[in-house]
Each structure stands twice: as C-alpha cells, then as structure tokens.
C-alpha cells in the first residue's frame, strides 16, 4: 500500500452485500414490478453516524437513482427499489460519515443528560451549518446562514436553540447538501435481471401432440391440439409444453418400451430429432405444417396459453446436419459416428453434438438460429432438454444473445442433476429450473428442501418449477399411493412453488403403472408410442386441478416464493405451511396429509398473533377446496384428513373486520 | 459476450473457494508449519472426469508448486499445502476435463457390464495415448507408443489389453502429460498470511509495572518487574503485557476511582499519555529508563516470556505533540482542544487524534514510527487500545508497513465492539483479537459463540484471545461466583482458545469487588492508583493456573482452534467439549460445572467410537488436574463436580495399546 495513493478520509466500509451472486459474476432474478431489497454491512470506525443510499439504474441509462437505506441492527442496512421494466438493472451502494447527523446525535445526548455547557456545541453545530451553506443553492444558502446565526445568537433562548438544532427543517436542508467528499461507493455494480411475470408464476401442462387425436389409431396433429385447448385452459394452465415436434429419425429407431428394434408402425421417440423432412427448424409432417403451428400459437394466446417448445440439441442419424456438418460430431476410429452413451447405457438412435469441435463457433451460431427461428414464429418459452451435457458458456452466451432480440423469452432448464450444476445453470441465465421436488416426499425432505430454496441465497437466482411427474419420472409415491397421492403431490407442487407443471393427461388420469418394478419409467411409455387418452373419464382429477389452479390465480401469495413458513404440527404425517403478503392482506395456510393410505389427524399451529390477528376474537378460516368455513380461536387447531375424500386443506385466513 | 473472445472448450467451473475472505480482498491466517486446506466446487458439463490441482507459491516466488486435489462428494474438492515460512503465500486452483480418465472410467463400466464390442473403445483409448505421446519426453514417448500399439494389437488377448488399459503404469504416464490446453484457472490469487506459532498459541499475563514493588507506598519500576519474572514464568505465561509505560499527563488528571480531581499523590491513568518528559517514545521516569526496559526485555526472553506493549494512540493535554502538531487535533470554536467524549461521558484528560486532519499523512507516518521505535527495542507484540476508533485503512497500512520490517510482529486488537467491526479489524491485519468471551457464560452462550468462532469462515481470519477479566471488565460471574468462578473461567478460556490471558495479580488473588453495584469497574481500580499485591497469599490460584498452563503446553490439541466438538451432557450446568489431533494421537475432553455454587452431576457423552477406540475394551481417561485415572467402558459416563474442590476435569483419553 502506497500511502500517497490512499484516501485517508474514506472511513466507511461496505461489505456483505446481498443479493450478490458469485461475487457479482451473475445477476439476481426478479420480475417487473418487484421491489428489490438490497442489504449490506455498512460501518465506520468510531461512533459517528453514517448515511447510506442505494443507487440503481437501467442497463442503458447512465444516471443513478438514489434511495436512502435504513439501519436494521448490528450494522446491517437495507434499501429497496422497484424494477418497472424488463431487462437488466444495476445497483450499488454509497455511504458516508455524516458530520451533521453525528453532531445532532451527540447534541441530543447532551441535552437529554441535561448538560449545562452546550453553548460551545451550538457553535460547533453552527460551524457545520455554515460550511454546508457554502455549497447550497442561493435560497437554501440564505436560510442555512440564518439558522446558523440563530444557533449562535445570544438573543435566542436555550430552549428555542435546542428545538431548532434538532428540527426537521434543519436536518432536511443539511441532508440535501450532505458532504459526500469522503463517500465510499461499493466497487461493484451488481445486476438484477428483470423478466415478465410468467417467469416466476406459471402453470405448465406437458402433452404429446401426436397423442391428441380423439380417433384411436390415428396420429394426432397440431390441429387436434387446438381442439384440446379449451380442456387445458379450463383447468387453468397457461403454458402448454410439447416434447420435440420435429421430424423423427428412422435409423436405429426405438420400439415400444424402448426396445432396440422398432416395428414399421412404431413412431419413434420425438427426441431422436431429424430425418429427410428436416431437422430442428422443421415440423414432423404427420403433425402438420408451420402454418398449422403458427395458427395454434395464435389460438392458444386467445386462451391465455403460451406454447412452449422443447430444445433438445441432439440429432438422429438421419438429421441433415450429419451430412452437412460432419465436423460437428465425434467420429470413431472405425469411421462411424459416436452415438450417445452413458456407459453401459447406449442410445444408438441419438448422436450428441461434439461441443469440443474446432468448429464450435459455427455450431453455436446454428443452435442459436434454431431458437431464434422458433421465437420468430411466436414462441417465447423453451424447455431445454439436458442442458447439463452442453458447455455452461454456451448456454450463457445463447440465452444472452436470444434475450437481446426477445427480452421476454423464458428458458426452463431440465436438469435433474448434481445440485451445484443445477444452480450453475440457473445463475448463468436459465429463467426457471426443474428441481428435486419429485424425490422429496416426506415432511422432513420437503421442509429442508423448501427451506434451501426459499430462505437462502438460492431464492435470488433460482426459480423452481415443481413437477410431480414427467414422461421420464413416475415416482414410487404415485405408483403406490393411488388417487390420494396424485392429489397430494398436486397440492404440494401448486402451493409450494409459484411455477409447477404436470405431464398430462397421464396425471389427471392417474397413470401409474411402471415398466417394471423399481423403474421410474412408465409401462408403454408415450415416449415410444402414440396413446389415446380418455380425457372425459369420470374419475379424472380435472375438476380438482381446476380448483387448485383457480386458488393459485386468486391468491397472489401463491404466485411468489416469498414468506413461506412451515408451521408446527403434532403429526409426522401432517405437513402445514403458510404464505402471506407483506401487508398481511392475503394469508394462505395449507395442510396436507402425506400418508395416502390412512386418515390422519392432529393439531396444527396457526400463528394468529404473528399475523396481527386479534386473539380476543375468533378468526375465520375459509377452506377453499371444499368452500367451507371454520372458526379459529386458538393458535393450535385440530384437523382430520381422510385421503380418500381429500388429503389437503387450503385455508384463506380472514381478519375479522365486522363486529356486531 | 462476444463469441470471438470466448474459449469454447473451457468447460470447467471453479467456484465457492474456501478460504476466500471477502472475495479475496483479505488473506487467511495461519502459522508456520500449518497444513492449509483449500476447498472448492469444481465441475464441468456432462459426465466427464475432472482433474484438479492446487497451486501455491511464496509472495516473492513466481513459480507455482502443484498438489493434486481430491473429490470429496457432491462436486466439492479438497487439497492442501504446507506453509514453511513466515510471510504471504498465494494459492489458486487449476482444473481440466481429463480425456484419458474419462475414457478409462467409461471403459471400466463397459468391462464391468461385460460388453463384448470393446475393440472400438480400445482403439479410441489408443488414439488418446498416441496424441499424448506427441508431447512426451523421448523415453516416455516410446513407451506410450508401445502401449498404444498393444491396446490395438490383434496378437494381445482381451484380458491383457483390459489390464493394461486400466494399469497404473499407463495412467501415471498419462497424468504426467495430461492435456491442459483447455484447463481453467481460478481467476484470483488468494493469499494466506503466515505468522510464527505464538500468533495462535500464546498465554498472556497483564500487569501494571507501577504496582510491582514489594515495598508498600513505593512506585514500582521496570527493575521490580524483572524480579517478578520468575513468578510469571512459573505459572506458564509466555507474554507479559504492560499497560502504557509512557509519561502520564498532569492536566485534568483523574483521581482514585476515576474522580475528576486528582490529589497531588495520585499517579493518573497510564492511558493519559504524554507529559514534559515525553510522549509515545518515552518511558515514565518513575518506571526507569529505556536501558532498564531493554534489560527487562532481554531478561524476560531467558524465561521464554515476551514483553507486549500497549499501543494507545491518544494524548494527554501535556503531550509534546499538542504543541508540536496542533494540526493533528480537533479545535473547538472557542480555541480549546476537543477532548475525548462519548456523550454524555467526557474524558477531559485525553485528546484523541483527528484522523480527518488534512495532515493525516504526517500523522500516520509518526504513529508508524512509534511502533517501529519499540520494535527496534526488541518488542514484537503489541496490544492495541481501541483500534475501532481509528480508520480501518490506517491499521491496514500500519500493520503491513511494520510487517515489512518485522515479519514476526504480533498485534492484538482490543475491540470489544460491534461484531462486524471486530471481524473487520482481524481481516485487515490484526494477528489476534479480544472477543465476547468475557460475556459468554451460560452453556448455550459458550456453545453458540465457539461454534461461530471455530466452525464458520471466522476461523480462517480471526484468532481469538480469551480474557476472563481485564482492568476494565470485572464480570458479574466473577463478582458473585467466588473462587470456583475464577477457576471455571480460567479453565474455559485456557482450553477453549489457544490464546488467552488474565489481568493479574487481580485474577489469581480473585479480586472481585466492583466500584458500585452493577458496574464492571473494579473498586479502587489499578487504572487510577498504585496497588500492592500479596502474590504469596495462601489462597492464590497460582498453583491451579500453573497446572492448567502446563496441560496446555503438553497437549498440542489445546494449541489450535481445530477440531473442537461440544459433547452432549444431560445437565444444563455441565458443559463438555473435546479436541483431538487429526490422527487422534492426542485427545482431550473437558467437563466444567458452570454453577459456581452447587455440586452438579450428570452423564457426559464420550464418542469413543468416533475416536477410533475399541468399544470392546475399556479405555483410560487420565484426569490431568488431579492426576487421577478413570476407566470408561461406555459412551456415556457419570461425572460429579463439586465447585469448592474443583469445578472442572480435563481428561486425556488414551487408546489402550497394551493387552495382558
């Protein structure tokens, strides 16, 4: 440290800023209208009073907007700003030792201690006021000089001087011209990425278009999907996600139940992308045309549904890329192409790209063009298949590039992989992420996992999307728990996470037969064959799902990850949690019986007092699934849940406003 | 992100490095001989195998030394290096996708799965080996080419090829020439500051030299201190710390018990530094001369005791600086100097420096010269008074400057202040720090505080020094708990922290009368008057302290902060904890009765199994304070502690090596 280069008077330290993802390497996430709360440790040597403000600006605006920060306790400060538009915002912090506030604080202590000799302190105060006046605008300067004179005047009595010294009038003027010559600015500009609302709050329905026809034996089409829209919209879904809709390869095509030899009638898996009809920018001819697709996108919009496409960057052996760009693939010494493998498993119908090719720049550009192509057709939501098997930098670059042209694009990362990798993908730009929810089934597992997602730094960069099932995952709990299990997992997903999705109609029709014991694969999986679902079945969960999604739509607390609390219960089978808005105007409390086989009862803790409710009079709990009303007078209340009838309760808690 | 500037093949991510203090802004701390353990999250996309190594170097050496890192679990890696000298070391991490290891891992899976068509994979392996051979030294190249040939040869049988492919011979050669062209290096060089051993393990005794005479009514001298050395050395202390030994001001001198008017016989407080006889580089004439001081430093060294001086950067009104450098002080509008205040408290006998003076550079230089002056006289340990009231940058600069000339200097920060400020001072360079130990007295308080100090990031930059008492702090526990309380707090300080200190002889003589009820000040405090202590008193704790310090010296586990575990007990009054060396060769278990008034008994948990002890045969617990031996057969053992006899047990746990 060279003494001459130091600024001796910069006494304030700013550290421990939150959010600050990987030391500022990545932006935090938010949606339009969010109030971004920033905290930091701010302190200086000694006992002087500090002023601090939060600075924020849009990426393309060089002017900072200032908001004052408040001291919480123990040198922790907090401030906030509202993000009003999509895009990147930057924020940083400035703080300084405030000479006048310090004087004022000490002066107040002297007065409180009834010290007699305060005249000298009034002179010191007046001196500060005069110095500030030197930098003030003409009108303010005159006023400040007058005030300084009064502070020192022999003609004014002590009481009046004390009042003036501690007056708002004086402190506001001094705040306006506070001496910031020794202010310290946090050396980083931290970023927050602002998305549209659906980035956080979205309700997904996954469906295979080819299984959409009502005529058994036929290949479903995009037009059939259009027919299905009212059904999906009725249930309250706002994202309709399709597995890949591109031409499917013939070479090494898989048969039913993933068998190695396909019959000529087997349609193959949609993830074996590419054939003579085209690749990632083409539509499987049996589904229809690009015009059909655009028509579907427009029709869906009328139902407030967005079509989400699957981005699966891999090729069938018949993909045009294989001939056009052999340099993008890995060749084996025998001159054959390297198919996908995770030894000893082999996927002979799929060739991965070789991202270590010397021609990676051309490859990256082409893959970006694939996304841009579909964005041009009106698609703004992409579910990305296996992103963890492509380089992190590729995704960071691709997402940033696409967002330059389509700032409202949403990417969901399908990565049921190692936790640090899952988080890394979220940090580098994925809007939403698949999670471990599917495998978190006990009270302890759910509580611990949700605590990690909502109470730690993870909440700042990771937006969970909870899936009780997918075409790849039929969990043991669903296999053995029957209808109650499907209801339970739906309520948990829908109320614990602002974004969730189901793979239907398998879900509402409670499909739960595995290919073999212990397998998470479905028997006769739709991945390898066309299915025909009887969506009108009487036992369908359609009505239940509709009710749950309506509750989500009506209650803003269920649309964000904030303020999730786990409430105590006296049973290991009953999980109870609540969410509330900051102003406590909306409070939702959920109780779920995790045992799908038996009626369970117990007492749940309802923190009425913490919610600002009067313990002297009963409060009303409106159970929204059954539309029945309960009265709670105590903080511990009895519940009994028969899973055959309904394994969950969703209470809206009302403050009593009326009195007789 | 500009595509052209990206390196597409750098697939590895290194993040979450520990230790990394404030994002690398500050060095971690260690002592010579320490094994520095570094951890990081290291991962890449996909399933490829990664190699990682830790790089370290001395500050003045540009060559990195490499050590391989090991995967722990869940993408967390660990490596370590030994620091052999004082000074700054740097470390960073390099990692890369290892093509051969990946091939080898997959190949093993194929073989394990009894795949038949492994020939093509052997060819792929051989291709990698040949590529590596291109970069190898002549001898190794020939060997690698030979091995590649065997892998592909039709003449070699499958079994032999498999053996060779997975042989150490091949993998070691390939490790040597691993392709690091796409290696990723962590972008920061992190620092670790290496001190001598006493920086961590030190045993302090604070004493007022002026109270050292054996002749009542006389002013003690440095010569008297020399007489006292055997007494202090016998007890096992290795740092003897003096409050300021400089001339004391006359103006506004404080009298007995901090009264505003001193009698002519009152000696004043040693912290009111400076008079006509000199300032911070002078010795109070009644204590002796600089020669006496140097003689004392040398004499102490013979007892393995270092003299520590107090650095109190403030002046009495009579300090020569006040006349020579009026610009270093704050002047009030009436032309008087601003004395120290913490309204409504006033310290009229002390003038603080005005660190916001325009002449701060000269002030900083002079204060540095004060420290250098005493370093030149042989002092290497400084206890710094109220560092939190001087700018952080000043200390960071001063400590770095002094260390340039005296790398073995130790600074102890006296900052019983807000936690974030206490930690900041440690981060910016203070070797050791006072703590909140003095106010942590219950089982819960002690457990939580020690967990924070030893199990979190704090352990990397903060070296606690535990003081059960100081001239400023007589805690309620000592006031009311009598002799058992003094024994308890000594054992806790001495065994929970590798550095601790007492203010004596007040401590061993159990001085515990406060100035007034509720005050933490001593009645007739030595800060304002000369005391005469009867160090030969029969009830002195001298022998007990001697025993405890000998146990500290004999047991390396008590000399570091590592591996502290709190053991369960079934009593709120019994606290139990243990420390062990990495190799479990030294295990110490401490039990303390925190109730100074009553005998308490209960069962303590002894984790014999975790210590690698055989549960089939009894183990021996040697109680070191009483030199008695116990036999433990169970993991729960009964203890009973009568505080009047001894409120603590310190067990050395022996593995049984002999058998009959």
Image: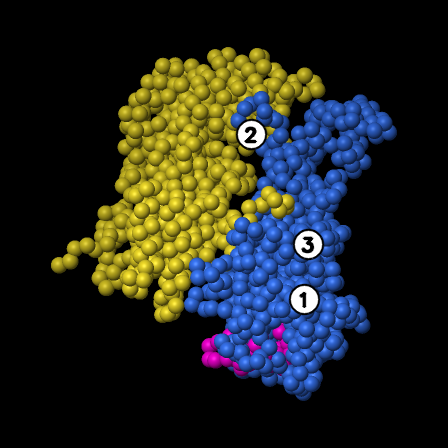
Chain colours: A blue, B yellow
Placement of B278 over or under A214, stated as above or below: above
Position of the C terminus of chain B, as image quadrant, is: bottom left
Percent x, y of residue A511: 58, 81
Neighbour tally class for label 2: few under 14, some 14-19, many 20 plus, Cα within 10 Å: many
Q: Quadrant of residue A542?
A: bottom right
Q: Secondary structure at mark 3?
A: helix
Residue drawn where x is 70% and y is 20% of the image: B333
Percent x, y of residue A551: 71, 72
Residue linked to disc 1: A282
B146 or B185, nearer to the observer: B146
Residue linked to disc 3: A402
Badge 1 and badge 3 both on one subunit: yes
Neighbour tally class for label 3: few under 14, some 14-19, many 20 plus, Cα within 10 Å: some
Q: Secondary structure at mark 1?
A: loop
Residue linked to disc 2: B393
Q: Quadrant of residue B155?
A: bottom left
A149 or A465, nearer to the observer: A465
Q: Is residue B290 left or right of residue B146?
A: right
Badge 3 and badge 2 both on one subunit: no
| Chain ID, mark 3 | A
Neighbour tally class for label 1: few under 14, some 14-19, many 20 plus, Cα within 10 Å: some
């Amino acid at each position: 440290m060279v003494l001459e280069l130091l600024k001796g008077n910069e006494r304030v330290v700013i550290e421990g800023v939150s959010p600050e993802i990987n030391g500022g390497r990545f932006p935090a996430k938010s949606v339009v209208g969010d109030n971004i709360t920033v905290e930091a440790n701010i302190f200086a040597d000694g006992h002087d009073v500090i002023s601090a403000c939060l600075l924020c600006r849009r990426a393309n605006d060089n002017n900072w907007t200032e908001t004052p920060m408040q001291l919480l306790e123990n040198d922790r400060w907090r401030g906030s700003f509202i993000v009003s538009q999509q895009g990147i915002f930057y924020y940083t912090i400035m703080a300084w030792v405030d000479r006048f506030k310090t004087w004022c604080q000490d002066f107040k202590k002297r007065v409180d201690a009834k010290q007699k000799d305060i005249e000298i302190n009034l002179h010191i105060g007046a001196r500060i006021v005069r110095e500030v006046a030197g930098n003030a605008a003409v009108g303010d300067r005159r006023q400040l000089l007058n005030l300084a004179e009064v502070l020192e005047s022999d003609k004014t009595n002590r009481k009046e001087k004390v009042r003036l010294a501690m007056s708002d009038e004086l402190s506001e003027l001094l705040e306006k011209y506070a001496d910031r010559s020794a202010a310290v600015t946090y050396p980083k500009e931290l970023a927050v990425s602002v998305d549209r609302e659906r980035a956080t709050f979205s309700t997904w329905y996954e469906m295979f278009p080819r299984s959409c026809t009502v005529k058994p034996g036929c290949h479903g089409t995009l037009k059939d999907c259009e027919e299905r829209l009212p059904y999906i919209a009725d249930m309250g879904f706002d994202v309709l996600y399709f597995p890949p809709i591109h031409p499917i390869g013939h070479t090494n095509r898989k048969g039913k139940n993933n068998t190695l030899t396909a019959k000529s009638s087997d349609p193959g898996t949609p993830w074996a992308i590419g054939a003579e009809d085209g690749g990632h920018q083409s539509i499987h001819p049996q589904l229809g045309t690009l015009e059909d697709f655009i028509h579907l996108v427009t029709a869906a919009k009328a139902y407030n549904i967005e079509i989400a496409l699957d981005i699966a960057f891999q090729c069938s052996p018949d993909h045009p890329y294989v001939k056009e760009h052999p340099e993008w693939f890995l060749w084996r010494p025998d001159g054959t192409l390297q198919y996908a493998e995770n030894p000893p498993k082999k996927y002979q119908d799929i060739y991965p790209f070789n991202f270590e090719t010397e021609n990676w720049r051309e490859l990256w550009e082409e893959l970006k063009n694939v996304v841009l192509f579909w964005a041009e057709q009106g698609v703004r939501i992409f579910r990305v298949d296996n992103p963890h098997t492509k380089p992190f930098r590729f995704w960071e670059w691709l997402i940033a590039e696409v967002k330059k042209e389509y700032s409202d694009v949403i990417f969901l990362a399908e990565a049921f992989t190692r936790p640090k990798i899952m988080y890394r993908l979220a940090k580098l730009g994925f809007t939403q992420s698949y999670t471990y929810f599917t495998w978190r089934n006990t009270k302890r597992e759910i509580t611990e996992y949700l605590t990690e997602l909502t109470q730690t730094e993870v909440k700042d960069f990771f937006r969970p999307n909870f899936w009780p099932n997918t075409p790849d995952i039929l969990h043991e709990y669903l296999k053995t728990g029957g209808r109650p299990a499907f209801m339970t997992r739906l309520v948990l997903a829908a109320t614990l996470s602002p974004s969730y999705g189901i793979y239907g109609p398998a879900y509402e029709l409670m499909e739960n037969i595995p290919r073999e014991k212990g397998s998470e694969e479905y028997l006769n999986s739709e991945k390898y064959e066309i299915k025909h679902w009887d969506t009108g079945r009487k036992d369908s969960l359609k009505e239940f799902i509709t009710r749950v999604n309506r509750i989500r739509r009506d209650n803003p607390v269920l649309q964000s990850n904030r303020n999730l609390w786990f409430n105590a219960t006296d049973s290991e089978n009953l999980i109870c949690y609540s969410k509330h808005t900051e102003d406590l105007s909306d409070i939702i409390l959920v109780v779920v019986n995790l045992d799908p086989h038996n009626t369970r009862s117990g007492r749940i803790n309802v923190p009425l007092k913490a919610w600002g409710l009067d313990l002297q009079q009963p409060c009303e709990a409106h159970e929204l699934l059954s539309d029945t009303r309960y009265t709670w007078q105590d903080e511990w209340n009895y519940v009994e849940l028969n899973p055959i009838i309904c394994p969950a309760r969703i209470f809206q808690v009302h403050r009593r406003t009326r009195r007789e």
